[in-house]
Image (spheres, coloured by chain):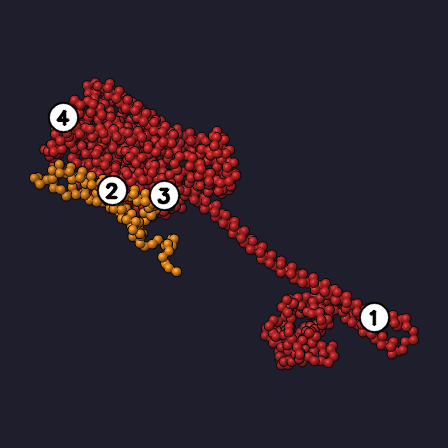
Amino acid sequence: MTEAGPPRRGKPPVFLERQSYRRRRVIDAARVLPFIGMLLWLIPLLWREDGEVAVRSSSAILYLFGVWILLVAGAGLLSAKLAAQARDGGSDAEARGGEAF
Amino acid sequence: MLNTLVFVGSAYALFLFAVAFAAERAAMRGQARWLRSPIVYTLSLSIYCTAWTFYGAVGSAVRSGFEYLTIYLGPSLVLIGWWWILRKLVRIGRSQRITSVADLISSRYGKSNLLAVGVTILAVVGTTPYIALQLQSVTLSFEVFGVGDIATGEEQGHTALWVAAGLALFTVIFGTRNLDANERHNGVVMAIAVEAVVKLAALLAVGVFVVWGLSGGVSGTLEKIDASSLGQWQIDGGRWVGLMMLSAAAFLCLPRIFQVLVVENENETHLRTASWAFPLYLGLMSLFVVPIAVIGLEMLPEGSNPDLFVLTVPLSQGRDGLAVLSFLGGFSSATSMVIVAAIALSTMVSNHVVMPLWLRYAGGGAKVSGDVRGVVLLARRLSIIGVVMLGYLYYRLSGGGAALASIGLVSFAGLAQILPAMLGGIFWRGASRLGALVGLTLGFGCWGYTLFLPSFGAGVFLPESWSTVGPFGIGWLRPHALFGIDAIDPLLHAVFWSLALNTGGFVLASLASFPGPLERLQGAQFVNVFEHSAAPRSWTGRVAQAEDLMIMAQRILGARDAQRLFEREARRQGMAGTLPAPTPNFLETLERELAGSVGAATAHAMVGQIVGGMSVSVEDLMAVADETAQLMEYSARLEAQSQELARTAAQLREANAKLTRLSVQKDAFLSQISHELRTPMTSIRAFSEILRDTTGLAPEDQHKYSSIIHDEAIRLTRLLDDLLDLSVLENGQVNLNLREGLLSDVLDRAVAAAAADEHGARLRISRDPAAEQVWLNTDLDRLSQVFINLVANARKYCDAARPALEIRVHSSDRLVIDFVDNGTGISPEAQDVIFEKFSRVSDQKAGGAGLGLAICRQIVTRLGGEISYLKGQGGAAFRVVLPADIAMAAE
């Protein structure tokens, strides 16, 4: 008798196989992305507003919209990965939990 | 010019009608797939960008620099972080069949209608000024083209009225086509998507014209920006953060956004696409705002309304076509917002306000289910007209001045009050109805007092003195300086205090209160929606539904009955096939049929699951649990009964076996007794005949024969005596002759009598004389009769080579006398019948009639004791137990 059989129901395994592990990490990335975006968009709070050293509006536009483009690209990338994983048969139910790593 | 504009506007409106109509037709023909692509979903979200943002963003940029961006950054972050909140909201919306944001709050907190009404009021109050703002912007844009033509406010009012009427008509036609508020409005969504494209294209076109047509490319534009009054980065840090948060909150709470985001959502995966596509859309919408503002400031005369730069910049350059496109963009922004907001608000008003009232006062309860559908439709249509007209009235009454311009953020702040209850509801199971009620009330009240009422201007609703010295002279209650903290931006002040009081009240009241059962179940369903609801199933087309219903019905009703039912219904619907369309009527019939088999609640839940693709509602679950509990109780009772029956049956079987044995014994006894009676009778008859017929008998012969006759008569008499004795004892007619005597004397007599009965005593009897010194007060003759019988039995039946009988006596609280011999004993199957009448252990030693032990038992019972067979003593062993009051004292 070996213990190599499928894990018993009701007791999820502690470690996931590689594919599920990747899926979890993509979801983690999707969770983190808005906080990165918020952080980047809060950076203008630190900019100097007075005198010669003040940040010029053209730089501000380039920065803010640059962040925007990066965020959209990041979200698009993650969305595509999630979609690909969903097609590969990874169920949403499997992806929702956070109990195994 | 104005005529052209009216023509273009009308043509565009007709075009939208056509698009909506075509989309509805396509959906009805089952070609809705391309109508429901993720891109259409994303575009429909663009109703977030109203005329306020289309025109107002440029004005805002002129007035306060980059602050306008916050309105777009917040929702972008919400979409990018869709995995946190939106995914859950959409799943809950789909599995619970949520129809509006008020419905969401109400469902979560135990289907409380009070909460629903509260949220509805909040939504109407918060949205009406916003609708007025849209009407104003359309009117203003008309005015731009008609400068010189129209000057009077009267004409403006007419424009607004016409627009309002047209929008109400469109919304009534396409917003209430379906009975089910949860069904998708294909036409409306399609029209909105088209409008989203138009407004984006318009703004991009103006932007491209400004950047490449007027400023000489990107670098030229950037230089111009740096050189303008907006050239330096200047923001209020508090407002930058605060407005970003506020717009994010409002994006989740605005009824119209909720409508397209959750209610109209067709497929959860669309959210995945929207997570990047919608931020992209917002980015494009805001990209050219600053350049347009800068060019407008540069080219247009001082004092021009910056809110209309999007229109006036192309016009000033003689680009009428571009201006008309821009006008259509603004028109699209305004109309799409009004349409969706009217649908969302009318759903709330009719579901949570009109219908409960109607059902209470006119409906006579829910039993008139046929009529209710019509009433719902009518209520929803009237609500739409009411909401749009309310917006128009607000516009007319407020005069359409600058008071309206700031109403966008005021409205945002008001609707953001829903946020604590919403987020608490979907993430915290402890959130309770009371908490939501307290939080909403506090937040709404604080918002109204600090922001909404003052927004009408000092002295309109709140006395002017209130803002300077506070109400009734209480300084720390001034609307703009609550608790004495002044010098904050009024908007931030209101947002901070209202949300702080709201959240605080919500949390504290939730912690202190105890939710009802429905509330707790709903809470679990909402918070753990991903555990409770299966992955969304998509029922494509109606045939699949009917087939699924068929499969389920066959499983419950049986194949033949189910097929007959479906065929009958199909014929009634006038269809040729065997599968009827899943109309409400058919579903009702099917549910009733199923209810006959599985109970009403279960049937409802099953049909609902297939038709609605939703999870079972809590009420259904509770009803099912009720039925199940009843069934379980019933089956438990059945089980107890069947166990009792089994016990009774076992007892009956035992009794029957005993009776059968007794009957066999009786038969055996009857033949025995007739034999016993017959033998002496035969000899008596024979010898008496000899005496009678034979003359000259020798006297010794005569004496011998007479003696035989006499002996046989005595034997007969003894047998009959025994029988009589037994019958007397059994009938309880015996009189006990109580005397005092020693047990040893009684035993002596019994042993002697038994020995006298038999010739040549071979039985060795061992006794314990010391223990036998017990005085008795009982019927000594009867008792000795018992002992004689037991000793005689041992003598007769003990089959040992050297038969021996031991008589043991021990007296404790009762007197116990054991008679144990060394024979083989009595077989186990015979043990429980030896005390019965006519019972004889074996046939080969036919000494008696089998009455001895039966008589013994009757006697001992009469004496108040008991006699039993002792098992496991080596040989046959009988125990006589006499009560203590018989045994007087051992001296």
Q: Indicate which disc residue A77 carries.
A: 2
**Dot 4: element:** loop
| Residue behind mark 1 | B684
Q: Are marks 2 and 1 on the same chain?
A: no
Is there CB contact under 8 Å for labels 2 and 1? no
Q: Nearer the viewer, mark 3 or mark 4?
A: 3
Amino acid type, callout 4: Leu
Q: Nearer the viewer, mark 4 or mark 1?
A: 1
Q: Are marks 1 and 3 on the same chain?
A: yes
**Dot 1: element:** helix
Amino acid type, callout 1: Ile
Is there CB contact under 8 Å for labels 3 and 4? no
Chain in orange?
Answer: A
Tell me the distance, in whole angstroms, between the alpha carbons under discs 1 and 3: 104 Å
Residue B827 to residue B303: above or below: below
In the rendered image, is residue B48 in sight? yes
> Where does residue B177 sit, x and y in percent of width and height?
38, 29
